[in-house]
Image (cartoon, grey):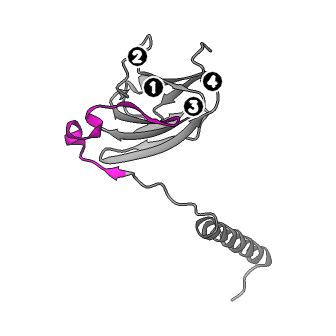
Amino acid sequence: MHIDRYERQYLIAVAAVLGLFFAALVSSALVFGVRLPQPEGYINPLTLNRTVFANPGMRNMGNGVYDVYIVARMWAFDAGSDEKDERGQDVLRVPVGSTVNFYLTSADVTHGFIVERHNANIEVLPGHVGRSSTRFNEVGTFHIQCHEYCGRGHQNMYIKIIVEPADGSAA
């Protein structure tokens, strides 16, 4: 069977690129320990009122570590905060240098969760508990937003995290 010279070069180039991608995939899993995200656990969305998510909110675990339990539902994040902003959305406050562990689940549809300028990014699915940790090393106000379109009130799904100086003075 005759294969044109240019077609042969093209097939060799495609095979080389596929081989390179496969080698990168294998080395990232075996050498660098990269794994696909897994849910922290499973939960029945119909029984959220009988779980830790019945009382969402922030818990101080000591040593600058906070656990935040959040329920995403159309069209708000419920972080159990007593403090609200001007639009009625939750506001969380942590001191600079804090590590925050976010635990999320959805009560209804697929939502997203991303912390502005930080490494927390979760797809929030009904029946799954997602977990992400991030460290806040900079004083300021950061937004948590839903990045999966979840309906007509989607643009209102956010939480503000205010990172305050460790001495408690105003930023």
Any mark on residue 83, and which? 2
Q: What is the secondary structure assignment of the residue under circle 4?
A: loop
Q: Amino acid at mark 2?
A: Glu
The answer to whether the residues at label 2 and label 4 have Cβ atoms under 8 Å apart is no
Question: Image point 72% across, 73% down: which residue?
Answer: 16
- Residue depth check, mark 4 versus mark 1: number of the one nearer the observer: 4
The answer to whether the residues at label 3 and label 1 have Cβ atoms under 8 Å apart is no
Dot 4 or dot 1, earlier in sequence: 4
Can residue 64 be found in the magenta stretch?
yes
Q: What is the secondary structure assignment of the residue under circle 3?
A: loop
Image-based side of 139 in relation to 112, left or right? right
In the image, residue 130 above or below residue 93: below
The answer to whether the residues at label 4 and label 1 have Cβ atoms under 8 Å apart is no
Residue occupied by mark 1: 158
How far separated are the C-alphas under marks 4 and 3?
13 Å
In the image, residue 141 above or below residue 107: above
How far separated are the C-alphas under marks 4 and 1?
19 Å
The image quadrant of residue 163 is top right
Q: Please state the horizontal and vertical placement of residue 34, each as a whole percent of the image.
A: 57, 60
Question: Image point 66% across, 66% down: which residue?
Answer: 24
Magenta region, residue range: 41-66
Q: What is the secondary structure assignment of the residue under circle 1?
A: strand
The answer to whether the residues at label 4 and label 3 have Cβ atoms under 8 Å apart is no
In the image, residue 32 above or below residue 61: below
- Residue depth check, mark 4 versus mark 3: number of the one nearer the observer: 4
Dot 2 or dot 3, earlier in sequence: 2
